[in-house]
């Protein structure tokens, strides 16, 4: 007998099909041969040092010393996406043509080039580099949230072809949209209803319940807990939850960022080692720009390894079938982190 | 400048990124070499004639003459899925453990083996076979909807590895769940609100507007219209809409089924020919079993070719970036259908 589980936050049902029995090890690819690994520098890569002219002018850059804008010697660059999904310049007006509502593709679409090194990833770069990536998220998030045309900033990372990117060079993306998408609105509505009923934050209460249950906890630090959610939609899904209730990333200073860098580095390192560098997406879920102080919103980072393909059932019903119970996923990740710890 | 468009039914925003300019032809694979095409019969395939013992006993079968149940000489079989996501036998009770709600994986998960031929698909089998597939959908839908444990029946087809199936033999699936998933509920809520406001069906009004606009119409018959929706989430998405307002499939007799068979055969044949057999899902969207007479629900068939990979932005925001304007998709499909017509 399989089990239906309801997400305690959104009330969305998922099917946990343990009978189909996909253990985490079943998803692990063969390790890549040395000659298939990317080089440390690729002269054709638009994100590699020396090719700064191949991208639009930078929005932000971190460097160790003084440098020319758009020159080399950077540690991290943020640039506009050359193939932007949205860009500033249009109008905020909605156009209504009979039943059909549209608006200009207003907003911004930026790329965070995370390091000059072509071959690294979040799980393999030094933890200081990860912290710098998070600092860039915080800085751009803050800047974009203060633009009155922006309603929501979505920060995400696509790793590997199966996760929707063909660019190897380590990068994240930041998209600012002029609307709060319905999917996000539904989650916020559910959280607000919970807050109105219980006088507490849904994610705070869920975190407390997960820490109490223990079986789905992957790791904990002073500031963060990593869990495989009770109603995970897909195998090995993990959620990084800040223990302090806040609506958005980066409002707690460097201590929190440094701790999140260690957590991300450890978690993504464990995926990299134990599952041979799986394709994945992660997304930083923060509050819409007009609700940065809302009591019912709690930011988090959701990590989704791309190990299964949603099919017609998921497209039709929106209900996911997950063949890997989150309890198994969490046990596997705990073990992977432990195995790596002595050499870290 | 890209464009944001809102689905007139659900109010979901999508980004139509025509600047990224993926024309339908850009997605077309190279045709498969003759030696890579599947054989007409595969002795190892559990769905091929002669291997009836490899599957659970059939739920329904169509044949031209008398035959032994679970013997050969069938034209179509419906069997329980050996790896069922849900199955009857559990309880309808909800279990609440603190914040965590669950229930038994109650329901049914069936496979429609569409034809004895191993190598055909909806776009290549004779139209009479397609009509038989639709008759099986109708018969099982009606039987499952009358089971009081069932809340929603989802009928879908996965074609190709990229669409989530590794089984080549032509088949569809029918899943009956004991809950109405949130995703479906949200659409129904939006339609009901529209009905309350306007006194008319949202999809009826949208269809009238699309027929008036013409640019996104692919084809029309007496009973159906095929459109590429104004706010398509992914490239080449199409929607088959019955012109008569009804909440569910198969309540209008054989005339409607025969017409839908012609439409599906033509549309999927055009995809097969003009895009070299793309991977796709389709899903029959019908009313929940307790709302079969609801005035605000209008059934349809959604076809989603799997030509792009949703990435972190889509996972995080639920908002899709579609690089192929539906107007281009519809023009391409109209041309493909016209090109095929003389030889059909």
Image (spheres, coloured by chain):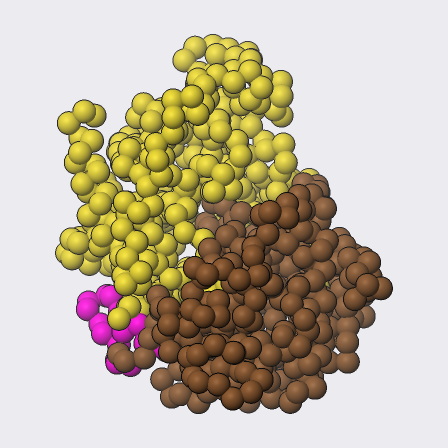
Chain colours: A brown, B yellow
Picture coordinates of residue B64 (x, y %)?
41, 13
The answer to whether residue A233 of the structure is visible from this angle is no
The front one of B229 and A335 is: A335
Locate the N terminus of chain B by quadrant: bottom left
| Residue shown at the point (19%, 67%) measured from the top left | A98
The front one of A9 and A274 is: A274
Identify the residue at the far right of this view.
Answer: A342
The answer to whether residue A331 of the structure is visible from this angle is yes
Question: Vertically, is A114 above or below B82?
Answer: below
Picture coordinates of residue A283 (x, y %)?
55, 68
Question: Vertically, is B23 above or below B118?
Answer: below
Circle count: 0
The front one of B329 and B149 is: B329
Locate the C terminus of chain B by quadrant: top left
Question: Vertically, is B60 above or below B145?
Answer: above
Magenta span: A91-107
| Residue shown at the point (30%, 54%) measured from the top left | B22
Q: Is residue A43 left or right of residue B265?
A: right
Picture coordinates of residue A182 (x, y %)?
43, 69
| Residue shown at the point (45%, 28%) measured from the top left | B170
| Residue shown at the point (51%, 27%) measured from the top left | B78
Residue B267, quarter of the rendered image:
top left
Residue B32, quarter of the rendered image:
top left
Q: Is residue B73 left or right of residue A15?
A: left
Whether B264 is among the magenta residues is no
Q: Is residue A81 left or right of residue B5?
A: right
The front one of A201 and A127 is: A127
Picture coordinates of residue B321 (x, y %)?
38, 62
Whether A103 is among the magenta residues is yes
């Amino acid at each position: 007998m399989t089990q239906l589980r309801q997400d305690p936050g959104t009330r969305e049902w998922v099917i946990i099909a343990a009978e189909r029995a996909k253990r985490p090890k079943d998803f692990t690819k063969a390790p890549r041969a040395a000659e298939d690994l990317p080089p440390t520098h690729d002269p054709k890569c638009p994100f590699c040092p020396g090719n700064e002219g191949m991208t639009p002018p930078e929005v932000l850059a971190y460097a160790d010393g003084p440098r020319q804008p758009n020159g080399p010697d950077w540690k991290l660059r943020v640039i506009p996406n050359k193939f932007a999904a949205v860009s500033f310049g249009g109008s905020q007006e909605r156009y209504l043509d009979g039943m059909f509502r549209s608006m200009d593709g207003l907003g911004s679409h930026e790329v965070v080039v995370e390091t000059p090194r072509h071959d690294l990833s979040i799980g393999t770069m030094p933890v200081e580099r990860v912290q710098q990536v998070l600092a860039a998220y915080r800085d751009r998030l803050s800047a974009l949230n203060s633009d009155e045309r922006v309603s929501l900033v979505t920060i995400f990372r696509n790793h590997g072809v199966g996760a929707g990117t063909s660019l190897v060079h380590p990068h994240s993306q930041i998209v600012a949209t002029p609307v709060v998408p319905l999917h996000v609105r539904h989650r916020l509505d559910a959280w607000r209803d919970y807050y109105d009923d219980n006088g507490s934050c849904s994610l705070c209460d869920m975190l407390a319940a997960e820490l109490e249950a223990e079986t789905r906890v992957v790791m904990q630090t002073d500031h963060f807990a990593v869990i495989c959610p009770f109603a995970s939609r897909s195998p090995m899904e993990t959620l990084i939850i800040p223990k302090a209730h806040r609506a958005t990333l980066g409002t707690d200073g460097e201590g929190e960022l440094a701790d999140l860098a260690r957590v991300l580095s450890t978690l993504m390192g464990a995926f990299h080692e134990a599952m041979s560098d799986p394709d994945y997406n992660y997304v930083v879920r923060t509050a819409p720009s007009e609700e940065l102080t809302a009591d019912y919103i709690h930011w988090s980072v959701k990590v989704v390894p791309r190990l299964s393909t949603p099919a017609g059932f998921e497209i039709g019903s929106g209900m996911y079938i997950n063949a890997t119970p989150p309890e198994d996923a969490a046990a596997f990740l705990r073990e992977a982190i432990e195995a790596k710890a002595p050499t870290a």
